Amino acid sequence: MLLLIPGPVATRPEVRAAMAQDYAPWDNDFRTLYARVRERVRVLAGGGAETHTALALQGCGHFAMEASLRSFVPAGGRMLIPHTGQYSARLATLARHAGHDVVAPEVSQDAPLDPAVVANALAADPAIRHVGLVYSETGSGVVLDAAAIGQVVHAAGARLILDAVSAFGALPLDVSAMPELDSVAFSANKCLEGMPGLCMIVARTERLQQPEAREGGSWALNLGEIYAQYQRSGPGSFRFTPPAQVLASLDVALDLYEAEGGREPRLARYRENVRTVYEGMIGIGLVPYLPRAVQGPIVVNIHAPADPTWHLQTFVDQLKRRGFVISNFFNTPLPSFRVGCIGAVTPEDMRRFVAAADAALTEMGVHRREPAPAAS
Ligand SMILES: *Cc1c(COP(=O)(O)O)cnc(C)c1O
């Protein structure tokens, strides 16, 4: 069964095999492994040894985002979180629960966020000291120009919290060139092609050492506390019980990432996956949600076909019988289905998927495949 969802992704057998073992968290071999994974991730993010550090936390991507929002934005601080889609809405929810005063202007969900929108919002309201952004909006499939928006944030003297959960490892990132960046967060189970259960953050060491980084109303989801643990007990010490098998499998996933040639070849493979799905769907009479020019390399949304026989769960079940799993929900304003193009999957897998989708629709009797009139 091949997962075509934008995380957790399909993994390679070597990655899964690394889980088939018991680990003692305090054991020196495990500490060495954890310290190594942290270093590898810091380097991948472009972080300097003196300036940046990578931290890991039990849990999924949202945990890393919550920890970032609580550790770097002072309680009650005003934040700008433009509403780019489903995941920016979640970021805003996490920020509100952390007690922040969130400004979430409506912006287009079908095009990358214009940096001028951020510049104008910051100029209009100098009380906004932090901006929260989703680098790759997994809801829409649109990718933002995080570096360009970061420059605007920097120019305004504000700080940036970046959700790179569906971007890290594939889309360009150089934290050393982003002085405005407080933290970038991601999980093991998306573009790094590891297992679920572990999230990571790359942050500025100097910011982690400030006493405010240990406030924020949560003791467990607190990056200052995690950093203090490394200082107390060494760089391979995990605060509370780690998902040890997931960490060990991430180490293997990073080996495979290097063997593939690193970020650019991985992104090239994902782009080719997206191209194959995007064009293949048009070829079988369906209509992709986004114009080609703004379609990102992570996930493709396809308009639900107009035919009254269309039924998402039936389609999902039909595909499953043919060896593919896609989401049984959508995150777009209009009905759609989504196809994740990340993970250990190739353009050849995507070609087989297109054929399976065509066969499934035919068996369902979905003949009118263009979107319902209201949608086009
Ligand atoms: C997957 C994802 C998350 C986190 O999802 P979890 O289920 O918490 O791992 C956050 N942001 C984006 C953009 C994502 O794609």
Image: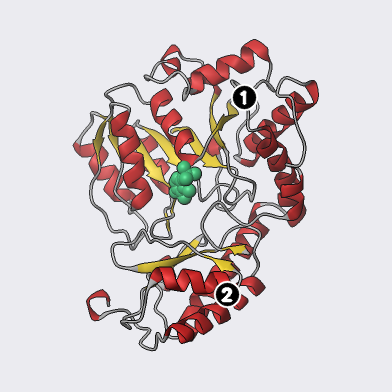
Residue at 39% of width from left, 78% of height from top? 287
Q: Where is residue 194 in the image (x, y as percent from the top left)?
A: 64, 47
Which quadrant does the C terminus fall into?
bottom left
Q: Nearer the viewer, residue 313 or 62?
A: 313
The residue depicted at 41 percent of the width and 41 percent of the height is 151
Q: What element carries label 1?
A: loop
Taking 99 as reference, is 20 above or below it? below
| Amino acid type, mark 1 | Thr
Q: In this view, does 174 lie to the left or right of 134?
A: right
- Mark 2 neighbour density, 10 Å: few (under 14) some (14–19) many (20 or more): many
Relative placement, left or right, of 310 versus 244 is left
Give the residue pinned by disc 2. Answer: 353
* Point 38% across, 43% down: residue: 133
Tell me if residue 46 comes above or below residue 360 in the rendering: above
Name the mark nearer the viewer: 2 or 1.
1
- The residue under label 1 is 241
User: In the rendered image, is residue 147 in sight?
Assistant: no
Local secondary structure at mark 2: helix
- Determine the CA span between mark 2 and mark 1: 39 Å
Q: Which of 235 and 62 is in front in this view?
A: 62
Q: Find residue 16 and report its horizontal and vertical position in percent.
A: 72, 48
For the N terminus, the quadrant is bottom right
Image coordinates for residue 110, horizontal then vertical, percent: 33, 63
Q: Which of these two is toward me, 24 or 30?
A: 24
